[in-house]
């Protein structure tokens, strides 16, 4: 399969002046998403709808003329399987997926696996909202968003961003909270503003960067 990037020239069959590029994707719908439960580090399968979302995400990227040199995923199978399905749709099954716990979803501790309405009944809506959307408040035995940021960003800065700045096209499939950490850095969000960021499942978010890692532009493929 031949891929070309319409935003860049081709000389001798090779792209030239490739701007650094990172594509972020939240995994397709999982069984716990479908049941309105906190997933955290639980490891549910994708639903059939989640599989369809992953396939559509791959097709959208293929239609946009994108192919990838590196692929990163969390260690949780809902993210890894989404990445594998997307690469299949892109004709890139052979591309290896680098999986790491650093990209895992936020650990929701005692909330993991609980229906969100059940959690509100048990602890109160205000408390559950604080755990979900404040920056540095931890749920029982779990991680705050701040903890998640401090886990994700060293991996991003050591592995993902350098690959993009070398001119490699990078695909990252992760989770709402781990994506918040990366977007917080890319878009210079404050701790307060990053807490309200939302990521639909299976929707690619394309970042084109300058060589100093500042953002040239972003596009959401819906």
Image (cartoon, helix red, strand yellow):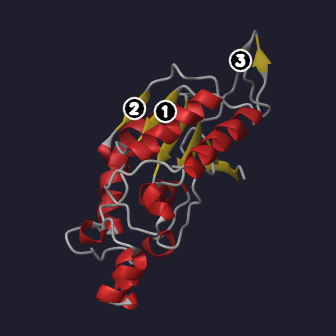
Name the residue that disc number 2 marks.
Answer: 98
Marks 2 and 1 sit apart, C-alpha to C-alpha, by 6 Å
Q: Position of residue 37 (x, y in %)?
A: 41, 68
Residue at 78 percent across and 24 percent down: it is 9
Where 151 sits versus 67, above or below?
below
Residue holding disc 3: 1
Mark positioned earlier in the residue sequence (3 or 1): 3
> What is the secondary structure assignment of the residue under circle 1?
strand
Tell me, yes or no, whether the two marked residues, 2 and 1, touch with CB atoms within 8 Å. yes
Q: Work out whether 32 lies above or below 7.
A: below
- Residue at disc 2, secondary structure: strand
Q: Which of the 4 quarters of the picture holds residue 142?
A: bottom left
Task: Determine contact: label 3, label 2, CB under 8 Å.
Answer: no
| Distance from the alpha carbon under mark 3 to that under mark 2 | 23 Å
Q: Label 1: which residue? A: 71
Nearest to the observer: residue 17 or residue 140: 140
Judged left or right of residue 173, residue 156 is left
Q: Using the image, tell me which numbered label, if any, was put on residue 170.
A: none
Pick whichever of labels 3 and 2 is earlier in the sequence. Answer: 3
- Label 3 close to label 1 by CB (< 8 Å): no
Q: Residue 100: image x %, image y %? A: 33, 40
Q: CA distance from mark 3 to mark 1?
A: 18 Å
Residue at the (36%, 81%) spot, across then down: 118
Which element type, helix, strand or loop, lies under badge 3? loop
Q: Categorize mark 1 by other alpha carbons within 10 Å: few (<14), some (14-19), many (20+).
A: many
Outermost residue toward the left in this view? 141
Which mark's residue is nearer the viewer, 3 or 1?
3
Neighbor class of circle 2 (other Cα within 10 Å; few <14, some 14-19, many 20+) is some
211 lies left or right of 16: left
């Amino acid at each position: 399969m031949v891929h070309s990037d319409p935003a860049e020239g081709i000389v001798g069959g090779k792209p030239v002046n490739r701007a650094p590029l990172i594509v972020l994707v939240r995994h397709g719908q999982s069984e716990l998403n479908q049941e309105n439960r906190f997933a955290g580090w639980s490891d549910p399968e994708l639903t059939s709808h989640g599989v369809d979302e992953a396939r559509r995400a791959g097709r959208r990227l293929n239609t946009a003329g994108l192919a990838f040199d590196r692929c990163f995923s969390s260690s949780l199978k809902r993210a890894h399987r989404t990445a594998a399905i997307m690469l299949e749709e892109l004709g890139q099954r052979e591309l290896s997926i680098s999986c790491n716990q650093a990209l895992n979803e936020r650990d929701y501790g005692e909330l993991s696996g609980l229906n969100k309405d059940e959690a509100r009944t048990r602890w109160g809506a205000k408390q559950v909202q604080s755990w979900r959307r404040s920056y540095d408040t931890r749920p029982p035995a779990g991680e705050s968003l701040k903890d998640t940021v401090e886990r994700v960003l060293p991996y991003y800065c050591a592995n993902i961003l350098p690959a993009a700045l070398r001119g490699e096209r990078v695909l990252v499939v992760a989770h709402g909270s781990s994506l918040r950490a990366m977007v917080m850095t890319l878009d210079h969000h404050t701790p307060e503003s990053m807490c309200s960021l939302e990521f639909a499942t299976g929707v690619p978010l394309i970042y084109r960067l300058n060589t100093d890692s500042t953002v040239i532009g972003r596009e959401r493929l819906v």
